Amino acid sequence: MNSKSAGSSTKIRLIEPYPYRFTVRCGSRDGGKTVGSVLHERMPGRPMERWQNLAEAGRICLNTFPVRPDQSVTRGDEITIDVPRVVEPAVPDDVRIVDESADYLAAYKPAPMPVHRGGRYHHNSLQAILEARTGRRLKIIHRLDVVTTGLVLFGKTKGFTAYAQRAFAQEQAEKHYEAMVAGEPGWEQTECSLAVRRNKGIRFTADQSGEGKPARTVFQVLEKNGDTAKVRAQPVTGRTHQIRVHLQALGHPVVDDPLYGPHPPESGTPGSLNRPISLCHIRLKLDDRLSWEI
């Protein structure tokens, strides 16, 4: 690993290319699909041509046997992929430990950076970087989107991890975000309680039919700037992309959000999906004793 300056001040973290093998396990919803479609659904940022080339090279196996991308799968099957040269995306070299004890570690995550290993990221995730830095295993308590900056809390002990995860699951943890949104809201404070459901691939949507997962976010306007406004978002629940989806539903999406923002034609391009957006997790309160802020 090495760091390199990008522009005049920002440093990025680079990983030398390396070989990697990973396995995708097929669930009940994958039955009848092809190997190629399963891989494309799990990793939508990769073109189908990628899987075709790896299969032709004998690097994709279904239950240990080389397979074509158009081969059907059933529940319980395992797809193994050998990638000879992984070029891991660079990430900002700006991870900071905000607070640490024998039980937990609170850190600042820059964007774009995933919280945990997966997809194209094995060494350049927040968890991997912090584990390499501290020399110990860290347990994930909650997550932030790749493109979101802010506070992330990890557990060091089973007892604290279980306690913190329970606080999040029971909606007891208090989370505050700040976002720059398009337009000036006609309200000073409001909330959105539309359910959130997966729409397609990595996209989610605010659901009017009640088929999605219950979600609730409270919003407050902090500043109005003509064409934009700064708002504080307090998600009561913790659904994927919840704040971004609810702001879109309210008609004031995050200004530079490639998935839910005011310029949807730009969304879907591989580069745009990994750009930082104007959404930051600034404060986390776990209980009366434990709170963190940046």
Image (cartoon, rainbow, N blue to C red):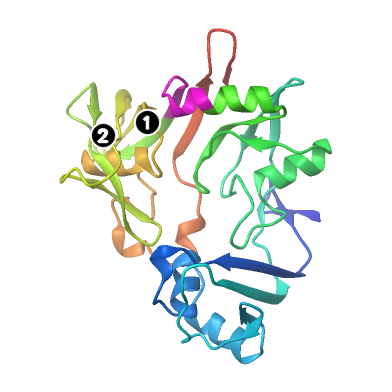
Tell me the number on the disc at residue 237.
Answer: 1
Question: Is residue 44 covered in magenta?
Answer: no
Instruction: State which quarter of the image contains the N terminus.
Output: bottom right
* Left or right placement of residue 133 versus residue 277 in this view: right
Q: Quadrant of residue 85?
A: bottom right
Residue 72 locus on image (x, y percent): 45, 82
Q: Which residues lie in the magenta part?
A: 166-177
Q: Residue at x 33, y 25 (%)?
A: 223
Helix, strand or loop at disc 1?
Answer: loop
Tell me the number on the disc at residue 289.
Answer: none
Hey, what amino acid is under mark 2? Gly
Q: State the residue lying farthest toward the bottom.
A: 56
Q: Earlier in the sequence, mark 2 or mark 1?
A: 2
Question: Is residue 168 covered in magenta?
Answer: yes
Q: Residue at x 74, y 39 (%)?
A: 130
Q: Residue beneath label 2, please?
A: 226
Point out the frontmost of discs 2 and 1. Answer: 1
- Residue neighbourhood size for the residue with mark 2, other residues' Cα within 10 Å, grouped as few (<14), some (14–19), many (≥20): few
Hey, what amino acid is under mark 1? Thr
Q: Residue at x 46, y 58 (%)?
A: 273
Residue situated in front as seen by the camera: 197 or 13: 197
Q: Residue at x 60, y 41 (%)?
A: 110
Helix, strand or loop at disc 2?
Answer: loop
Residue 120 locus on image (x, y percent): 62, 63
Instruction: State which quarter of the image contains the C terminus.
Output: top right
Q: Is residue 65 above or below residue 120?
A: below
The answer to whether one can see residue 140 in this image is: yes
Q: Is residue 247 above or below residue 103?
A: below
The answer to whether one can see residue 294 in this image is: no
